[in-house]
Image (cartoon, helix red, strand yellow):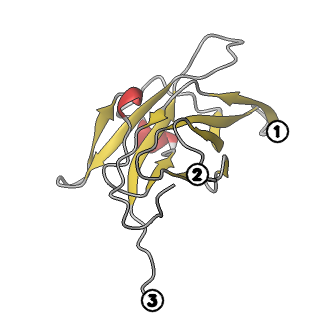
Amino acid sequence: MTKPRTHLTNYLVVPLLGDPGERTVRCQYFREDFSTVPPTWIVVNPGKLSTHRHDMIYFRQPTAQEAAPYVPNQDTTLELFAAVAKTRNADCGMPNLMPASTRRLSVSVFPETNRSVILIFQRFEADGSFGELVATTDPDVQHGTDGSALPDC
């Protein structure tokens, strides 16, 4: 029996500065173009995120230094904490909570499905202590898997 292959579509996510007291955060999303050295970042509309025929979507929050040339208005007090997801057009039994590890996380997307994904960031105070959790209102991940690694629902 062969082991299923898992392929990831990678996105960078950078939280943006907002108005004081705002309960949600807007983010800028990028894909890395590795055909250049060093890789360049290509802006992606959050409504256009897709797995691009892969089985999972992978979010990585770059360091403030990495993001600075592309996003001067980044919120450096926020760190990727988790994601919650809901499959909108099927009940496939996929996980709905994905904790982040070192500012990275992945979300499964079964064939012929769309998932609403809310990224959750933790805000730290100036002294490094935990402040609050802040969520995004986007993105929506479109299906794009060819179904080779995951069963049909």
Left or right of residue 40: residue 58 = right
Q: Between disc 2 and disc 3, whose residue precedes?
A: 3
**Residue 98: x, y in percent?**
65, 50
Q: Between disc 3 and disc 1, whose residue precedes?
A: 3
**Residue 53: x, y in percent?**
31, 53
| Camera-side residue of 125 and 12 | 12
Q: CA distance from mark 3 to mark 1?
A: 49 Å
Marks 3 and 1: CB-CB under 8 Å? no
**Residue 25: x, y in percent?**
59, 23
Left or right of residue 132: residue 75 = left
> Which label number is shown at residue 1?
3
**Residue 59: x, y in percent?**
49, 47
* Three-letter amino acid code at the position of disc 3: Met
Please tell me whether residue 63 is drawn above or below residue 47 in the rendered image.
Answer: below
Marks 2 and 3: CB-CB under 8 Å? no
Residue at 45% over, 82% down: 3
> Which label number is shown at residue 92?
2
Residue at 60% over, 46% down: 91
* Three-letter amino acid code at the position of disc 1: Ser
Q: Determine the image quadrant of residue 19.
A: top right
Q: Secondary structure at mark 3?
A: loop
Q: Secondary structure at mark 2?
A: loop
* Three-letter amino acid code at the position of disc 2: Cys
The residue that disc 1 covers is 129
Please tell me whether residue 33 is drawn above or below residue 46 in the rendered image.
Answer: below
| Camera-side residue of 39 and 55 | 55
